[in-house]
Image: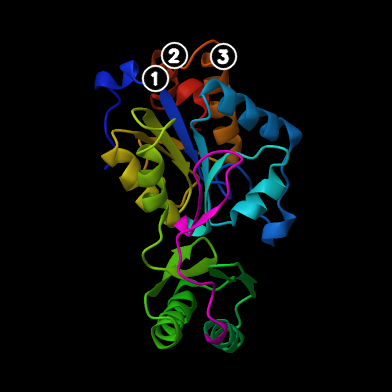
Amino acid sequence: MPHTLRGPIISRPISLFLDVDGTLLEFAQHPDAVVVGHRLVALLEGLHRSLGAALALVSGRSIASLDRLFTPFRGTAVGQHGVELRLHPGERIERMAAAPVPASLGEAVARVVDEHGAAFVERKDFALAVHHRLAAPAMQALRRDLLETCARHAPGWTVLRGRQVLELKPADASKARGVDLLMADAPFAGTWPIAFGDDITDLDMFEAIRRHGGTTVSVGPRIAGAGDLHLASPGGSESLLRAMADALAFDNDARRVLQLLQPDPAGLAG
C-alpha cells in the first residue's frame, strides 16, 4: 500500500528506476513506432549525471532496444522484465536466463496466437510478447492457453499480463529481482529509490522499491491506486522529472525533491 513520505529519506541521496512504455513514452500501435524526443533523452542524461549514475531504465524491452530508442544515452538497465541486467553504463549485458526462447515454445505460441486472433508476437532473445486488442474474457482465454503452452514446452516459464500484451518469460526473472541486485551495489546502495511505472507488470518493482524504503509513482489509469503519487500520463512523468532535475541541479539532496513528491505537485498529477 502507498505510504506517507516522511522519515530519514531526506538524509539519503536519490536513485531513479524508470519504466519506459506508458511511463516515459506514449504507447504506439507497434513497439517500434514509439517516438522519443531529443529533450527526453537530454533529460535522462542530465538526471544520470546529477544522480551520480544512480538511474536505471526498467523495462519489458530488451536493453538493446532501449539503447536504440534513447541513443546516445546508455545507462544502467533492467531489460525483458528482469531477464537482462546491465549493472553499470558501458558494461556488458548479463543474462539472468539459462537459455533463449525454446524453438518449440515459439512455434506453439504462434499457433495459439493465430487461433485466438491476437495481433502479433514480438520475439525477444529471452522472452516473447503477445500483443492483442482483445476484450477481457477473450484475453483471459488466450492467457490460459499460453500458460498451458508454457507448461508443455517451457516448464519454469510464466505469462505476465500487461496493457494489451501478454509477456512470456522465465518465472524466476522479474523487475523486482533487477531492483534488488542494483540496490545491493554502488551507486544505488544506500539511496532513496524512486520508481515510476504504469502497469501491472510494474507492481513487483514497486514492492521491491518499498522493501528498500523507497517511493513509487504510478502513471496513467492502470495502477492509479498503487503508487505513493499518481500522474495522469507520460507527459506528467516528464514534467515531474524535469522539476526533479532542476531541484538536483547542484547536488543530490533529497530535501529538494521531497516537496515535489507530495500529492499533486504543481498540478502534475492532474
The disc label shown at residue 258, or none:
1
- Relative to 178, 109 lies left or right: right
Mark 3 surroundings within 10 Å by alpha-carbon count, few (fewer than 14), some (14 through 19), many (20 or more): some
Residue 46's spot in the image, x, y percent? Answer: 62, 24
Tell me the mark number nearer the camera, choosing from 2 and 3: 3
The quadrant in which residue 258 appears is top left
Magenta segment: 82-104
Residue 168's spot in the image, x, y percent? Answer: 48, 71
The quadrant in which residue 47 appears is top right
Closer to the chain start, of discs 1 and 3, is 3
Q: Are marks 1 and 3 in contact (CB under 8 Å)?
A: no
Closer to the chain start, of discs 2 and 3, is 3
Q: Amino acid at mark 2?
A: Arg
Identity of the residue drawn at 72% across and 41% down:
71
Q: Is residue 174 visible?
A: yes
Residue 239's spot in the image, x, y percent? Answer: 59, 28
Between the residue at mark 1 and the residue at mark 3, the CA separation in whole angstroms equals 15 Å
Tell me the mark number nearer the camera, choosing from 1 and 3: 3
Q: Main secondary structure of the magenta part?
A: loop
The disc label shown at residue 124, or none:
none
Q: In the structure shown, which secondary structural element does the residue marked by tag 2 occupy?
A: helix
Residue wearing tag 3:
249
Q: Which of 5/221 is in front?
A: 5
- Relative to 124, 159 lies left or right: left
Q: Amino acid at mark 3?
A: Ala
Residue wearing tag 2:
256
Identity of the residue drawn at 57% across and 16% down:
246
